[in-house]
Amino acid sequence: MNEDKPEIISQRYQKIEKIRERGVNPYFNRFKPKNQIGEIRARLDSLGKEEIEKIEEEFSVAGRIVRLNFMGKVNFLGLRDRTGEIQIYLNRTDLSEEKQWLLKQLDVGDFIGVSGKAFRTRTNELTIYSKDLILVTKSIRPLPEKWHGLKDVEARYRQRYVDLVATPKVREIFQTRAAIISQIRKFLEDRGFIEMETPILQSIPGGALARPFVTHHNALDIDLYLRIATELHLKRLVVGGFERVYEIGRCFRNEGISTWHNPEYTMLEFYLAYADYEDLIKLSEEMLVSLLQQIRGQLKISFQEKELDFTPPFARITMEDAVAKKLGLSKEEIRQGLATKNWLKQKGLKLLEGDGWGKALTAVFEQAVEHEILNPTFITQFPVEVSPLSRRNEQDPEVTDRFELIIAGKEVANAFSELNDPADQRKRFEEQARAKAKGDEEAHPIDEDFIQALEIGMPPCAGEGIGIDRLTMFLTDSPSIREVIPFPLLRPE
RNA sequence: GGGCUGGUAGCUCAGUUGGUUAGAGCAACUGACUUUUAAUCAGUAGGCCGCGGGUUCGAGUCCCGCCCGGCUCACCA
């Protein structure tokens, strides 16, 4: 029945049949380990041979066989559970005839349960001496080779379950990712934020400038969009009285795929009333410093052979100053927009009809400046033209009280004092509508209900979005976003 | 989408200017082995060389097209 499969696999299926014929269930589900391997190691790793031999306690563990060294009567195997690995010793002379037979059926990849006292071998390896053996789950497919592991990148992403078994580093990355998210929750909840869940299916995909995925609801017979941000709903919650609110959730953007972009990615957004973007600069520094210390234990970390210094305060510069310095322009020249537009034209980059100085400035910044930034840097005072949801700066209403945090040339956070003037919000949306009419596919759609919410009244507040995947890349020194997403999007085989 | 680059056994990889029947290590199978940990030793088996055309007496190798990756540029977080 498995004739079209590789030989190894049909052999394993036959082995399972033989095991069943002997009355052994190859998928036994009633073994309950009393101990975790990590806990045993924590207790015994530091103890010497004699001390361990005095311990009468029998340990019971279950896990996956990751190594087999069978030598006839004397058999060693490596067992791994979620907390670690430990060596198991089985001597054939201790086992019943049935168990001796079962021992010979074991393969790397199988799950077993064992129990026994601990000892140290001749080579001082901490080992559990088990006189029994319970097969818990038989494995059919062979795992990758033990010292090269799974190298084929495509196979690693498509069959992440194999990658996770074969590559310890990959397990660590996802453990770190979970720790980052858990610590962010704690950081925010310690400060009075509460977590909310807002709609992923939306009829107006707002809160960011990006192209959405479209889907369809059959019963209502309407098209819906997968959210590109959580912003507008979280601010509605601020209107409703949740003065400190956050969400960690998946966002979807129908755009290119690269080492820094996955079509679905995880974003943290948080909003706090009676705060402005200066407060968020401080809060961002605190949050990152706390994460760096907990995850990496230091503020200077290496990322892809470069050193990143997270020692606060982080550098900050306005977008205009950054571009003025780079191109040798005056502020007046930037505001006129001609110099920046000419620079873009020279580079073969075109703007749309009607794009103002703000879009030109932002484009030049992204082209010429952003990628040169290494250490965490706050870029502040984004033009109103590219910031339809941000509050205007009181001294200079052409720019907003907004910043992005750039690390190693990549945007990691975007934050601003929130626009809470409904009349201004309506104007901004109308400007976006005009840009859309001229062909800007990423222009923000008009959201009348959101304007109504602002008319009910939103207290002054500030909000921030942080890309969790990118943050995880920096904290785990990963070269691609696919290394920090368990199942990145790939074209179907 | 453009450029560069890759796809050979379950896994990691060789494969010469085109030339017998496509190789190795690990994993697997049979056997030996009472402290191994890249165990060792003897033997056996395992291939749609990504897919489809073409050139040639002869193609894993050369040419064309396609599929699926990786890096990179452009757009985006």
Image (spheres, helix red, strand yellow):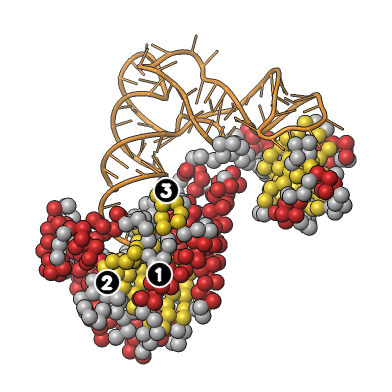
Residue that sits furthest to the bottom in the current view: A456
Which x, y percent locates residue A8? 64, 34
Among the two numbered marks 1 and 2 on one chain, the one whose residue lies closer to the N terminus: 2
Q: Callout 3 environment at 10 Å: few (<14), some (14 to 19), or many (20+)?
A: few
Q: Read off the residue under disc 3.
A: A304
Disc sitting over residue A465 in the figure: 1
**A131 or A437: which is nearer to us?**
A131
The residue under the point 54% across, 62% down is A294
What is the three-letter code of the residue carrying label 3?
A: Gln
Do the residues at pointers 2 and 3 share their chain?
yes
Badge 2 local density, few (<14 within 10 Å), some, or many (20+)? many
Label drawn at residue A381: 2
Q: Horizontal placement of A434 versus A158: left or right? A: left
Residue B57 location, x and y as percent?
37, 13
Q: Quadrant of residue A9?
A: top right
* Residue positioned 84% across, 36% down in the render: A92
User: What separation in Å lies between label 2 and label 3 (alpha carbons)?
Assistant: 30 Å
- Point out the image quarter for the N terminus of chain A: top right
The alpha-carbon separation of the residues under discs 1 and 3 comes to 24 Å
Q: What is the chain identity of the residue bearing mark 1?
A: A
Which element is circle 3 on? loop
Disc 2, SS: loop
